[in-house]
Amino acid sequence: MAYVIVGTCINDAACVDVCPVDCILPRPNDPRFREADMLAIDPAACIDCNACAEACPVNAIYSEHRLPQALQRYRRINAELTGRAVT
Amino acid sequence: MTKRTVYSFCHYCMCLCGTRITVENNKVLSIEPDRDNPFSWRDFCRKGKTAAQVVDHPRRIKTPLKRVGERYVPASYEEAESDIAQRLLRIIERHGPDAVGSYSGNPLGFNFSGSIFWNGLLDAIGTRNRFWVGSVDQNNTHVVMEQMYGTEMLALIPDVDHADCFVLVGMDPAQSKFVWVETVPDGWNRVLAAQRRGADLIVVDPRRSTTAEAANTHVAILPGTDWAFLLGVLHVLFAEKLQRSITAVPLKGVDEIRALALSASLDDLADRCGVPAETIRDVARRFGRAQRGMCLTHTGVSHTPTGTLAEWLGAAINAVTDRLDRPGGKRVERGYLDLAQIWSKFAPPVKHRTRLRDNPTIAGFHSLAELADEITTPGEGQIRAMLIAAGNPVVSGPDGAALDRAFAQLELLVAIDLVQRESHRHAHWLIPGTHFLEREGLHPLFAGLTELPFAQYARQAVKPPTGVKEEWQFFMDLALRMDRNLFGKPGVNAFIRASRWLARMTGNPEHAMNPRWIERLLVMSGRRLKYDDIRKHEHGWLYGEKEYGHFAKALRTPDKSVHCAPPKFLWALQQTLAERSTRTRAEYPMLLINRRVRESMNSWLNETEGLFAQQRYNVAELHPDDAMGLGIVDGEWVRIHSPAGQIELPVRIVPGGRAGVVTVPHGWGSAIYDPVNNDAPVRLGANRNLLIDRHEIDPFSQTPALNAKPVRIERISPGLGPRADATTQALRVEA
């Protein structure tokens, strides 16, 4: 289980501030942060606490279980962007 | 020095998340969830992650501090203990031991050694004027347990994985996790998983909480009327014969509660709680027809004047629908020792009653709502000295302004804590406290409160600041200094001194009396586990399987049955039904309620930098209709009035939920003083409990009405719109 960031992400890192396990990448102090099209959640590290989804100002974060069908591809994208095998 | 990893668990809330702590040179580098903990880690949150920031608090008290005029000067423990002992003895001699009052906060409850020796010190003093934080939180559940199950200490564990229907009243587990007195790790996500498998989730809450958003049905009830809703559910269950006649545990009083529930009119109850009768009927049917289920009532319910009646009715619903000791209902975890039995041995045979309002202790302590008057009202038994351990009652309790004035007139106020908080403003002595990262030990009293048979010995991650004593040491040394026997038992002090002599002679500090001895004895008393085996499991020990069938044996009612209709509850419910009043009135047309925030733990962590990176204050959540009616825009500052006081804070407009309700979380607005450098106090957010009347309490639980408080909201500067949050910026903690 994990949360998933979708393409409407605006990279404001509001989610990064509230994540208890630092599983949202790249982090603002990472040089890749500036170039990133979107942030992504490491599905192996996420603990499903919902804090990021509450913090996101543009509702770009979903619980995997509530991810709309049209956005399912972001499961794979989040895994790839965080260097995890796709499950 | 090299890095090392310490496995322990977080002690902020009952989730007890396993932690993996990386330490170097007595400094915590990181705290992460311990994914190898077999019981709990999935509720890990930023409180646990940032715990080291509390250890390294820039205003931490690191040595006893003595008040001299308006300043504090460092002193030795020797000097502190000697002065405090002399002053306490003088007060006891003149006015008796009850002139020394005490208050302990939530963190002391998580500190087993501290709380045992705290009680030892209070027994040494001989005072019965003991107050604690449970009286603004969970007291109603203790009262209901006592009346229905025969003991104040028999928490029932929700069996969430097997439930087909959840009725959650006054709780927001998406924020606060699935904890009450007991704990179900990852409980909220497990409820959501059950829901995906087809379980029905019904949430009763005036607010559209995160939990309510996930519900199949959200019942936006009128605050303070949970009892009417739950009685309506009982009415329908009985009227439609949805109760069960064969139950896993024997029941008594079903006829009485049935008669009362059926005598009430569903339309009348619906009108009282602001929920259509059809909705109540629908909820009752769904719950009654579900094969397995549970009705849970938490803080939102307990913080009302009828919180005990509602807690009872919720428990009665579970009893008559056979949810007790059944899969998917509520069960007893027997743990590795018998908490109820130990409690019955240690609790005084007769409950002490307060001097002014004649209220009995609950779970051994009096209600915080009574403390201010017990200090300020002259007469025999008046409290003249206070010991406060890990507590901030001026912020946690009702009408803190009155309690602050009361504390100002004390002859002696001693605070034991990590930092000097609002409640310690008038302290004559500040004594350093310790953080859980600095302590080790087993908390045997958690044994029956964890969902599964689980035990974990907490490991020390870092040492306390040089010279700082753990709480238990200070309490023991103070009793020795007063030459009054710890625990009030003859010979204890002589025994402690002898053990210390032996430790010196043998060079083995373990031979000196210490809390590990008590932990070991308690584990032995349960005859199920060995203390040393518990210590060997560094990630914690899941030592058995979940079992059912222990409830009937654990009952301590004389007839070994669950009492569904305790006479005093029946009587009070009849009285409540006979009355008809609305809480709001023209001058105070809205109802104030409370809420939980995942990152907040009552009154003691909110100033931690890493917890609220984006917003370091609390806000008043308003329904859009109310905001429009008052002409308030999002972000605008408002003043909230009640007869007890007023506060100012910004508004957030939140759609959903019930109009006429304003939500403000508690725990904010506490001053954090700087007794060493005398810098200006830090104060973040507003203390909404200043709006609460200390005299309006639930007659059974003695819990003040922190919820359903009638208030009025007014704009501070009409037409100016949102105002910059200058206050919080100006008050940042200077590291």
Image: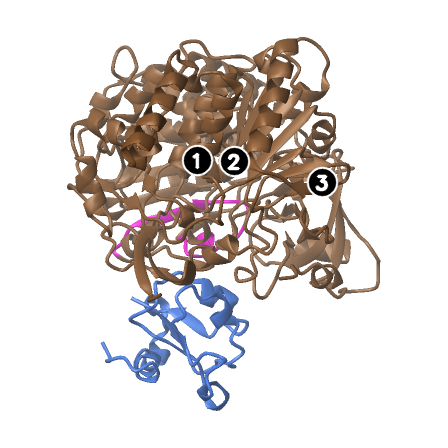
Q: Which residues are magenta?
A: B197-215
Please give the label number shown on residue B711.
3
- Residue B186 placed where, x, y %? 32, 52
Q: Quick check: can you spot residue B195?
A: no
Q: Nearer the viewer, mark 2 or mark 3?
A: 2
Name the foreground residue: B35 vs A8.
B35
Q: Secondary structure at mark 2?
A: loop
Q: Amino acid at mark 2?
A: Gly
Residue B661, horizontal then vertical, whole percent: 63, 46
Do marks 2 and 3 share a subunit? yes
Picture coordinates of residue B138, whole percent (x, y)? 47, 32
Q: Report, in whole angstroms, how far the alpha carbon at label 1 lies from the one at label 2.
A: 7 Å
**Disc sitting over residue B109 in the figure:** 1
The secondary element bearing badge 1 is classed as: helix
B686 left or right of B520 in image: right
Q: Secondary structure at mark 3?
A: strand
Q: Nearer the viewer, mark 3 or mark 1?
A: 1
Three-letter residue code for mark 3: Val
Tags 1 and 2 both on a single chain: yes
Snapshot quadrant of residue B197: bottom left
Chain letter for brown?
Answer: B
Write the residue at 39% across / 38% down: B296
Q: Which mark is residue B105?
A: 2
Q: Residue at x 61, y 52 (%)?
A: B59
Query: Chain A is shown in which shade?
Result: blue
Q: CA distance from mark 2 to mark 3?
A: 28 Å
Amino acid carrying label 1: it is Gly
